[in-house]
Amino acid sequence: EAQVTQNPRYLITVTGKKLTVTCSQNMNHEYMSWYRQDPGLGLRQIYYSMNVEVTDKGDVPEGYKVSRKEKRNFPLILESPSPNQTSLYFCASSLWGSDTQYFGPGTRLTVL
Amino acid sequence: RKEVEQDPGPFNVPEGATVAFNCTYSNSASQSFFWYRQDCRKEPKLLMSVYSSGNEDGRFTAQLNRASQYISLLIRDSKLSDSATYLCVVNRKDTGNQFYFGTGTSLTVIP
């Protein structure tokens, strides 16, 4: 089944404790992206990647890191999480030239 | 100024009604346009792309007006299952390949 998976789905952590949210897709998509969704603000793009070893900042990259070492994986790293990073995070992927994005199920992160 | 603006609603309509959602975008360099549907904090799913000539998919019709930088979605004969949040999405490639989402318009279809 074609899909985007994210892990973990739910995470409660404390300020400053490094964490990684994984994202994997099995559709051989070139483009992958991370978003956060907050009430009243909608989805905002954090980082995106147009292919392996190519990453670019979105609208809200501060406090986040990403890497794209393999085509299928695009982990989101929070080196020192803070409470303002409490949010619902979505990973998405799309085929180059399509622009139709397929989203993962979301990761609900709470930083205390 | 926000890249994409939508009326948040909520829209509460009876079954069978026709409802229209509007969206404006601020940057004329925007290239691709979409409507996504999101159910209760689940992942967004593509409803339809929006083409310059307008396009229809069953009960759903999308229109794009590049001159006014305006996108619309019309839902005819509303069903209970149409209750969701509808997200207007714009893609720009002048600054890379970025997507901008509106905050969404909430629709509830009432029996």
Image (cartoon, helix red, strand yellow):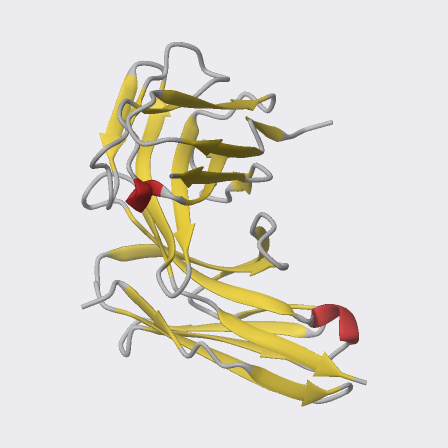
x then y, percent, for residue B57: 67, 66
Query: In the picture shown, does residue B43 fall above or below A93?
Result: below
Q: Residue at x 26, y 44 (%)?
A: B93
Q: Residue at x 35, y 61 (%)?
A: A41
Is there any visible trace of residue A6 in the rendered image? yes
Q: Residue at x 47, y 18 (%)?
A: A73
Q: Quadrant location of the C terminus of chain B?
A: bottom right
| Residue at the limit of the structure toward the top, as seen here | A69
x then y, percent, for residue B51: 46, 63
Taking A108 as reference, is B67 left or right?
left
Taking B24 as reference, is B16 left or right?
right
Residue A6 or residue B7, whichever sits in front: A6
x then y, percent, for residue B84: 63, 67
Q: Residue at x 58, y 47 (%)?
A: B43
Query: In the picture shown, does residue B29 fall above or below B99?
Result: below
Query: In the picture shown, does residue B34 fall above or below A70?
Result: below
Residue A31: quarter of image = top left
Q: Quadrant location of the N terminus of chain B?
A: bottom left
x then y, percent, for residue A70: 43, 11
Residue B110 or residue A21, whichever sits in front: A21
Is there any visible trace of residue B18 in the rendered image? no
Query: In the picture shown, does residue A91 fall above or below A59?
Result: above
Residue B3: quarter of image = bottom left
Taking A53 as reference, is B59 left or right?
right
Instruction: Give the number of callouts.
Output: 0
Residue B56: quarter of image = bottom right
